[in-house]
Image: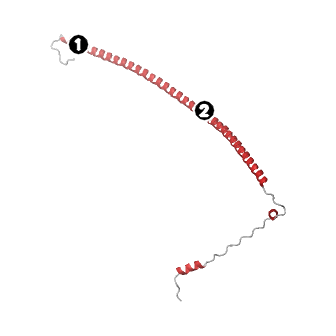
Amino acid sequence: MSTRKPATPRQTPATETVSQAAQHLGEALTRKVEALADAAGAKIGAAKARIVKKRDQVETRLEAAVKKTGTRLTQATAEARQKVGKAVVTAEKQMERKLTGVKRAVKQAVKKKAAEVNKVATQKLAEARRTAVKVPAGSTVAKKAAAKKAATKKAATKKAAPKKAVAKRAAPTVTAAKRAVAAKSAPARKA
């Protein structure tokens, strides 16, 4: 400790004893501080290990929850697609049924209208026949009508005359008007 020599010889052993005691005390304190540091480090390490373990457990749980949610989402999406597909098929079938019903109704309405028109036409034809003037067989009107019928029957039984071959197109002709325009626009020739 001290670097000075003691003044009396009696103090020399005491100073050596105090010096040794100070050394022992310093070593003991150093060991105690190191032991406390080691204990604190061990406790901190254990706490850190517990925290890391808990963090890993939380991460594992979170990953499992995310995977589970993803699986559920995929299943829900697939189910929704199936339901939408079924709904579309059902709607299409319903529309086809309605369309078939509409087609039947239209056909019935057309048949009904055609029957009405046919009935009216039959009535008008019968009325026209009743009111028609009878033409005597020897009159000129009857002879002309018979001749016309006979001519149409003959024409139908004859073959159609073969078509004439199309003549080649002749060279274009220059009309007098075109010549006059050309003469006016062309410069006069000297003789």
Q: Which amino acid does label 1 sit on?
A: Val
**Numbered disc in front, either 1 or 2:** 2
Q: How many labels sit on residues?
A: 2
Q: What residue type is labelled 2?
A: Lys
Residue 73 in the image, given as x and y percentages of width and height:
54, 30
Question: Residue 8 bears which disc, if any?
Answer: none
In the rendered view, would you say 64 is above or below 174?
above
In the rendered view, would you say 100 is above or below 4?
below
Residue tagged by mark 2? Answer: 83
What's the CA distance linking mark 1 and mark 2? 95 Å
Tell me if residue 57 can be seen: yes
For label 1, the crowd category at 10 Å Cα-Cα, with few meaning under 14, some 14 to 19 and many 20 or more, is few
Quadrant of residue 51 within the rendered picture: top left
Tell me if residue 158 can be seen: no
Question: Residue 18 bears which disc, if any?
Answer: 1
In the rendered view, would you say 140 is above or below 120?
below
Q: Is residue 9 left or right of residue 57?
A: left
